[in-house]
Image (tube, rainbow, N blue to C red):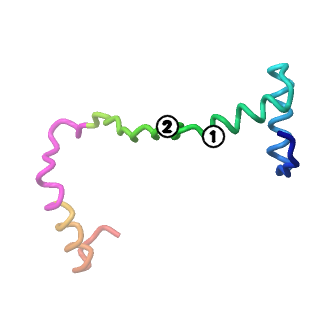
Amino acid sequence: MRTTLTLDDDLADSLKEQARLLNKPFKRVLNDALRRGMSPGTEEAPTPRYRVVPNRSGLAPGIDPLKLNQLNDQLETAEFTGQGSG
């Protein structure tokens, strides 16, 4: 069947480039692309889930992580009462 088809310039350029690289006629590359796009089950592959890789970063020996908030409270109190070092 012969028909007139209007393509966006970027799409036409891409198809022409693919035809040149594959050494195939433009018509065949276009028909193959349309067949792939219209065939059932050609959904895009799902995006892989983002995976966080943890990095071990321990505190220096002798630092009690449970007392960090206590230290912060002491520093805030000292700053508020004017007894801070600044």
Q: What quarter of the picture does the C terminus occupy?
A: bottom left
Q: Secondary structure at mark 1?
A: helix
For the residues bearing labels 2 and 1, Cβ distance under 8 angstroms? no
> What's drawn in magenta, residue-wise?
58-70
Q: Which residue is mark 2?
A: 41
Question: In this image, 66 relative to 11: left or right?
Answer: left
| Nearer the observer, 57 or 32 | 32
Q: How many marks?
A: 2
* Within-10-Å neighbours for mark 1: few <14, some 14–19, many 20+: few
Q: Secondary structure at mark 2?
A: loop
Q: Residue furthest bottom?
A: 81
Question: In this image, 86 relative to 20: left or right?
Answer: left
**How far across and how far down the image is residue 1, in percent?**
82, 39
| Nearer the observer, 19 or 69 | 19
Quarter occupied by residue 75: bottom left
Question: In this image, 18 relative to 70: left or right?
Answer: right
Residue type pointed to by label 2: Gly
Q: Which residue is mark 1?
A: 37
Q: CA distance from mark 2 to mark 1?
A: 10 Å
Residue type pointed to by label 1: Gly
Residue 79's disc number: none
| Nearer the observer, 59 or 50 | 50
User: Measuring 63% from the left and 34% from the top, which residue is drawn there?
Assistant: 36
Question: In this image, 85 relative to 23: left or right?
Answer: left
* Within-10-Å neighbours for mark 2: few <14, some 14–19, many 20+: few
User: Measuring 35% from the left and 39% from the top, which residue is drawn there?
Assistant: 52
**How far across and how far down the image is residue 49, in percent?**
39, 40
In the image, residue 83 sits, relative to residue 29, either above or below, namely below
Quarter occupied by residue 73: bottom left
Q: Magenta stretch: residue 64 in it? A: yes
